Each structure stands twice: as C-alpha cells, then as structure tokens.
Image (cartoon, helix red, strand yellow):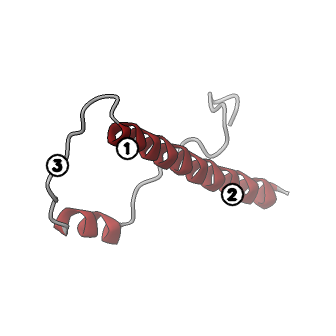
Amino acid sequence: MIRAGWRKLGEWIEDEPIEDEQIDEQSKPEGPKVTYAVASMEWQAQQQQKEIRRIEAEARRERRRLARVAMIMNAKS
C-alpha cells in the first residue's frame, strides 16, 4: 500500500455520519442565532467551546483511524 502512495493506513476511509444522524440533524429546527460582540466574555466562552468540540472530534476521528489500522494489521498477521 505504501508503494501505491498511501502514507497512513486507514486514511482512505472517510468518516461519514450514519444515515440516521443525517436525518436527525436535518429535522431539528434551527434556534435563534446569537451573535456576541467580539472579545466579550460570552464570545470568548463560545470560542473556547468551539475549540473544545473541534479537538474532541479530531480525537474521535484519530481513535477510529487507529482502530482501523489495528484491525488491518491484525488481519495481515
């Protein structure tokens, strides 16, 4: 696989949401959008929450990727 150009095992599989999750997300009504003043306490808290969610999502993707790699490596042994 490395000769074929893959640098990371498990990289070719995309993490797509489950079909049910897509339907649930589409059917939820959007609430009122709140825009806080830049640099206000609320804005800073919102930015911190976004960063935390981004880091958690990235960690979940990496755990899934490593699980796939482990599965592939075990299958080859």
Query: Residue visible at 51% across and 50% down?
Result: 57
- Where residue 23 appears, as percent x and y from the top left, is 24, 68
Pick the quarter of the image with the N terminus.
top right
Looking at the image, which is closer to me, 1 or 37? 37
SS label for mark 2: helix
Mark closest to the chain's N terminus, 3 or 2: 3
Q: Can I make out residue 68 in this image?
A: yes
Cα distance between the residues tagged 1 and 2: 32 Å
Question: Along the horizontal axis of the image, is 10 left or right of 45?
Answer: right
Rendered view: 32 above or below 38: below
Q: Which residue is mark 3?
A: 33
Looking at the image, which is closer to me, 6 or 14? 14
| Label 3 close to label 1 by CB (< 8 Å) | no
- Say what amino acid the circle numbered 2 marks: Ala
SS label for mark 1: helix
SS label for mark 3: loop
- Say what amino acid the circle numbered 3 marks: Lys
Question: Along the horizontal axis of the image, is 30 left or right of 58?
Answer: left
